């Protein structure tokens, strides 16, 4: 397989100490040599070394640089790779990139470096997706899960399952082609044993899917309550920053405010809503309607009540609206005299967590964060070699694979001829292969890598 030489800026655009322009391909060293001037040409530099020199445009010195030389196959892309380390800033790195393009490189597409690593067999598809998750990780726990995927933990488990299925298919083939050497009852026993093993292992992986997906995508969390109960104060407390305007005037929040926060390792896509109430104010009414809409899409509801006011019909209506959702009830403003009936609150909560807070005094926030973490992660995430499935594509394929292996088991129990059972076994093998990219359409590969940033 042959590729042209690509180039892109691999560091974030903007002011910074260092900017890196990366080249990959057969001509990477030759192209870099055309714009580099140092003690000796880059073509004479040993692999995996870094040299000092200047980036030149003809006789004009453009930049001072440190240039890394990495020759195939011991590189990320398994091609020759050159990384030009220059001063950070928009002008400097863009000048270096333009020179590389001028002398024969092509601007890389989003994710093309990682795509080449996949196509050249350096990593499989699930590891490539792990790279993207690692870049986007919002918490330490999310980063650890992504790092495990990059290291190939999921790939190894999938490989074990596919090998078990392959051995099963081979045994079926022997039974079909040489029935005198393989008793049918033995083959059926082997099919059941392998099918049970594969189903158990798929169940274990799917058992981590809920936590894994939350860590990868974040938990859609909506703060609801009547006006002036402290919703915006709660947002500010969790974000540790004054993101929302807080006043004693009811209806201050007119629109939906979104923010990403890290609560005990759980990433929350936190939404502060306009207070839900009947109002004649047209602008506030639009905010209330938006609040009702995001409520329907939420995975976690933080329902805020006022410690200094009696429960109203609007409060009780909110309890009814979130009846079948994950809810944590927050009774705020414990710094004022109690008027709310906490027994009635617990009755309406129906066993769901109830936390009391005084956000103005920063009291009760730790208990709230603990309740959020406990609701979705019973105890801490496992460490070590634990494997978490966090990608929606992987989860869907595992669920399909579980279904086909169950179809195979049912067929075996009904005495269906083993050559027909083999169809479901083979389909399971193919579905698992799609996770790591062994059997996947080129259009899907292009779509996945198009989601990467340039230079990765």
Image: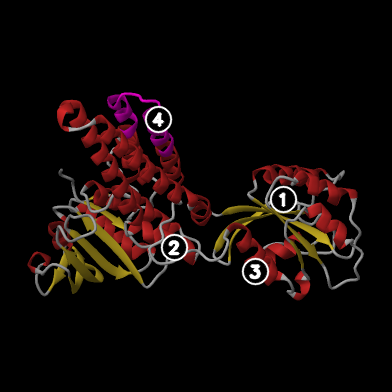
Compared with 358, 293 (above or below) is: above
Please give left or right for residue 382 compared with residue 284 in the image: left
Q: Dot 3 lies on which element? A: loop
Residue pointed to by mark 1: 255
From the viewer's side, name the closer residue of 182 and 244. 182
- Label 4 with label 2: CB-CB less than 8 Å: no
Q: Where, by quadrant of the figure, is residue 439 drawn?
A: top left
Q: Quadrant of the C terminus?
A: bottom left
Residue 272 sits inside the magenta stretch: no
From the viewer's side, name the closer residue of 79 and 159. 159
For the residue carrying disc 4, how many other residues have a C-alpha within 10 Å: few (<14), some (14-19), or many (20+)? few
Q: How far is the residue under mark 1 from the one under mark 4?
A: 58 Å
Q: Which residues are magenta?
A: 402-425
Please give left or right for residue 378 compared with residue 446 in the image: right
For the residue carrying disc 1, how many other residues have a C-alpha within 10 Å: few (<14), some (14-19), or many (20+)? many
- Label 1 with label 2: CB-CB less than 8 Å: no
Q: Dot 1 lies on which element? A: loop
Q: Tell which tag, 3 or 4, sits nearer the viewer.
A: 4
Q: Tell which tag, 4 or 2, sits nearer the viewer.
A: 4
Please give left or right for residue 391 compared with residue 186 in the image: right
Label 4 or label 2, whichever comes before in sequence order: 2
Residue pointed to by mark 2: 143
């Amino acid at each position: 397989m042959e590729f042209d030489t690509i180039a892109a800026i691999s560091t974030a655009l903007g002011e910074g100490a260092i900017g890196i322009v990366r080249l990959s391909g057969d001509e990477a060293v030759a192209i870099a040599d055309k714009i580099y001037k140092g003690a000796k040409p880059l073509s004479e530099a040993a692999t995996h070394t870094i040299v000092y020199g200047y980036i030149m445009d003809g006789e004009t010195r453009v930049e001072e640089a440190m240039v890394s030389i990495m020759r195939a196959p011991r590189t990320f892309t398994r091609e020759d790779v050159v990384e030009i380390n220059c001063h950070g800033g928009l002008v400097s790195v863009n000048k270096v990139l333009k020179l590389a393009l001028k002398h024969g490189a092509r601007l890389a597409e989003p994710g093309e470096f990682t795509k080449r690593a996949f196509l050249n067999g350096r990593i499989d598809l699930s590891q490539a997706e792990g790279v993207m998750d690692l870049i986007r990780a919002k918490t330490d726990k999310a980063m650890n899960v992504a790092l495990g995927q990059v290291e190939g933990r999921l790939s190894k488990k999938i490989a074990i399952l596919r090998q078990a299925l392959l051995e099963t298919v081979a045994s079926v083939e022997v039974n079909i082609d040489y029935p005198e050497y393989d008793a049918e009852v033995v083959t059926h026993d082997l099919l059941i044993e392998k099918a049970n093993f594969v189903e158990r292992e798929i169940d274990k992986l799917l058992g981590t899917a809920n936590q894994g997906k939350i860590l990868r995508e974040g938990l859609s969390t909506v703060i609801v309550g009547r006006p002036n109960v402290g919703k915006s104060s709660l947002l500010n407390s969790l974000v540790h920053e004054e993101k929302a305007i807080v006043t004693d005037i009811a209806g201050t929040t007119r629109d939906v405010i979104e923010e990403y926060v890290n609560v005990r390792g759980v990433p929350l896509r936190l939404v502060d809503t306009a207070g839900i109430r009947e109002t004649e104010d047209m602008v506030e009414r639009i905010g209330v309607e938006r609040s009702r809409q995001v409520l329907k899409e939420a995975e976690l509801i933080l329902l805020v009540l006022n410690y200094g006011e009696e429960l109203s019909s609007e409060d009780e209506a909110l309890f009814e609206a979130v009846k079948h959702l994950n809810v944590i009830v927050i009774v705020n403003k414990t710094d004022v005299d109690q008027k709310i009936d906490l027994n009635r609150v617990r009755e309406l909560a129906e066993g769901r967590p109830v936390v009391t807070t005084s956000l103005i005094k920063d009291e009760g926030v730790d208990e709230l964060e603990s309740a959020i973490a406990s609701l979705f992660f019973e105890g801490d995430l496992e460490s070590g070699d634990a494997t978490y499935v966090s990608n929606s594509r992987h989860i869907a394929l595992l669920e399909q694979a579980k279904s086909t292996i169950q179809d195979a088991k049912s067929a075996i129990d009904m005495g269906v001829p083993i050559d027909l059972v083999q169809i479901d076994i083979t389909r399971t093998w193919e579905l698992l292969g799609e996770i790591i990219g062994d059997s996947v359409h080129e259009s899907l590969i292009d779509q996945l890598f198009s989601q990467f940033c340039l230079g990765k």
